[in-house]
Amino acid sequence: MNNTSTKNEITVIITCHNEAKYIKECFNSVVIQSCYENIKEIIIIDDGSTDNSPQILNQLKLDCVKLKVIRTIGVGLASARNIGIKSSNSEFIAFLDGDDFWTEDKLQNQIKAFKKDKMIGLVYGDYFDFIELNTSQASAIYVRSLNNFDKNQLMEYFVKDAPIIPSTTIVRKEVFKTVGLFNEEIKSEDTEMYLRIAEKWKFFYVAGVNLYKRKREGQLTERLENFFKDQKIVSEIAISRNPYLKKYSKKRESFRSVKVGIDCLIRHNEKLKTFKYAINALKLNLFNLRAWALIIMLFFPYNILIKMYDFTKNKFYQLRKTI
């Protein structure tokens, strides 16, 4: 028996849409969890798959009594997660996209964090980013910690955006009873949800790379630019409930503009777009040092700036761990 109490029952909600190539690897990463006894149920929402995902899921179900498959007809990611939440029967819910997978200690490393404070509603962490099937080139993405409870976590998340990746999270089911379900009308439903959670609950960051997040050509999440306009809607929704956030809205938009610029540069080698987003960031906040640094990076050859970016990112993370 490990240190995690069996009372901490977890429902794992997996969303699947035409993930036949990846869903078995995803599912297997759940059943090999070191605290598998804490997993009460695994719910897979098969949202209108037209490949052979249904056949694979039927086979997996034969070998796992904890697995429940719910079939829907193209309702979308937010709706699929909401169906999973409403169907769950555990104290905690962990989300996983059907083309991602966990390390074997993911849940074990995170679930014990909830013991630190009864108001911790969401736990999240770092992840590996990799292309399609090539995990050998996976790049560790170290996420901002929001663990200083003396600060206003809502304001911190609103301005800086961790980011919190759904497949890294565990959430108390009670959270959804107090803040509602995912907004099914917007693309940035996860960010909008986390802002609502931050109004009433605490976040907790657990260091450690416990997720492999797959990048696939044609995915909506392939480009942060796809969410840039939608994020303005998210800001407006949050401000409507918390008017004091309005004074931070330009700073938030400036920060996000830099993030999109970095994505255009590092992942897509689009210097012109990067320059436009950096200039936009400076128009909103002239003192955004990351925007100035982004402009300087444009003068370096692509292969060199990639090395510079990786070096700086890793050094920053090492420094942050010592603080």
Image: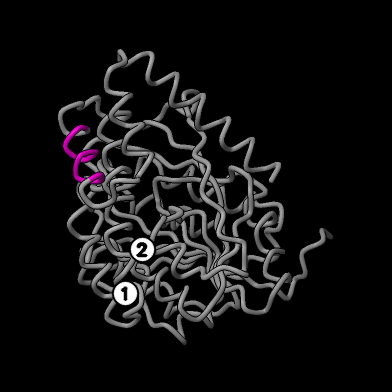
Image point 46% across, 86% down: which residue?
177
Quarter the N terminus occupies: bottom right
Numbered range of the magenta stretch: 275-282
| In-front residue for pair 119/305 | 305
- Left/right of residue 53 with respect to residue 86 in the rendered view: left
- The residue lying toward the viewer, choosing from 88 and 121, is 121
Task: Indicate whether 67 appears above or below 142.
Answer: below
* Image coordinates for residue 281, horizontal then vertical, percent: 25, 46
Q: Secondary structure at mark 2?
A: helix
SS class, disc 1: helix
Q: At which x and y percent is residue 114?
A: 67, 69
Q: Which mark is residue 238?
A: 1
Going by the image, does 78 lie left or right of 116? Answer: left
Q: Which mark is residue 35?
A: none
Structural distance between the alpha carbons of marks 1 and 2: 10 Å
Viewer-nearest residue: 54 or 309: 309
